[in-house]
Image (cartoon, rainbow, N blue to C red):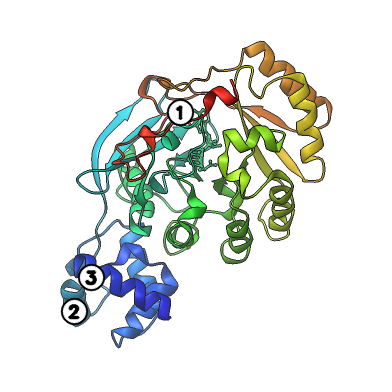
Amino acid sequence: MVVILLKMLLLRLNTSLVNLLNLDQTQLAEYFVGLGEKPFRAKQLMRWMHQRGMHDFTQMTDIAKSLREKLATEAEISLPFVQSEQISNDGTRKWLIGTDTANSIETVFIPEDDRGTLCISSQVGCALACTFCSTGRQGFNRNLSAAEIIGQLAIANQSLRQEAGYDMLPVGERIISNVVMMGMGEPLTNYDNVVTAMQIMLDDSAYGLSRRRVTLSTSGIVPAMDRLKEDCPVALAVSLHAPNDELRDVLVPINKKYPIKELMMACNRYLEKAPRDFVTFEYVMLDGVNDTVEHAHQLLEVIKNVPCKLNLIPFNPFPNSGYETSKLSHIRVFRDILMQAGYVVTVRKTRGEDIDAACGQLAGKVLDKTKRALKKIPIEAVA
Ligand code: SAH
Ligand code: SF4
């Protein structure tokens, strides 16, 4: 309660109005109690905001007029603004979303035969500086608010729904069936806002997504993984990318703090409460760096005690990255070694190439506060 009141106070200091998109249902109920109202109002408000996309309190007809008037003076429902929307030849869409005048982030929708996946950003830039990642290279500016995170789902949902010709989708139908926290940023270093936004995704009065269809991808922030399993267990993807600490220390520098052995133990603890009985390990394929036969055998050794699937991601190049994508023949050999050991392995298809919508290419516009671009990055150590 104290945390929520503080959060509201801070939001008020910033805008003077409370943006209700920053609150999940529990927090919204507490907000109403604070206004001297009944907590069940939260459910009504969630439906208006998230299911009907209504942002004008005066139109919320099942709420007493006096409360609507009070809300209009106290609160707002404010989405980030869309700067542009691009559509790829393969149907992938990318929205450039403005979070303030200087910064923007990217959100991508990937339609497939049996699902529609939205890839959401959690921060403007990223402080973790993985050497093969374009977001990491840009440095870090700030965390996104819960409203800016859930706002990406709202914007994509609204745009796709309008295009399909629906004001509201028929019950049980969804265009966006899956959400992956795999856009810009490390979600577990923006823990509170990410968890609030995910609670809204899962809430039946809001988006009602299944826990199994919301995936959080992390570079391995071990203490936050332990918290997440208690607070909001969703499907988990872990960016492994290297089969030994020496190499991972360079590719994913947070490994120096949470090395592979600790990370593997955290994965097993997470699985005690996870909605799926496996973790997905992501492994970016970097030519000559982490893609040899020996690396594949080391990887088998590292993951042997963790129930998992493997996702091999051909490196998406960006200017001056210093890396190259593994040769297709090497990816196949690597994949076959893992498959022969009994693992389910997928090689990620690159989608939306013509609009730069691929993993790790999401760039947005980051006004770097860490001055990362000026720092020397030790790529030569692994090349
Ligand atoms: N910070 C989180 C989630 C965002 S990145 C994480 O690191 O897991 C989503 C995925 O894209 C991660 O697995 C990340 O390592 C991968 N990725 C980053 N840059 C990439 C690139 N240039 N090519 C391919 N995959 C990349
Ligand atoms: Fe950050 Fe993830 Fe990129 Fe690493 S891969 S820099 S954790 S966004």
Q: Is mark 1 within 8 Å of ligand 1?
A: yes
Q: Which of 18 and 185 lies nearest the eye of the viewer?
A: 185
Query: Is 231 displayed left or right of 318 in the figure?
Result: right
Marks 3 and 2: in contact by CB < 8 Å? no
Residues under numbered marks 1 and 3 in contact, where contact means CB atoms less than 8 Å apart: no
Q: Upstream in the sequence, badge 2 or badge 3?
A: 3
Is ligand 1 less than 8 Å from the beta carbon at label 2?
no
Question: Which quadrant does the N terminus fall into?
Answer: bottom left
**Residue 60 appears in the figure:** no
State the CA–CA distance, disc 2 to disc 3: 19 Å
Q: Name the residue carrying label 2.
A: 70
Amino acid type, callout 3: Leu
Residue type indicated by callout 2:
Lys
> Nearer the observer, disc 2 or disc 3?
3
Give the labeled residue for mark 1: 358
Badge 1 density bin: few <14, some 14–19, many ≥20, Cα 10 Å? many
Q: Earlier in the sequence, mark 1 or mark 3?
A: 3
Element type at marker 3?
helix
The one nearer the camera, 113 or 218, is: 218
Give how far apart the Cα atoms at labels 1 and 3 are.
37 Å
| Residue at 61% over, 59% down | 223
| Residue at the spot of label 3 | 13
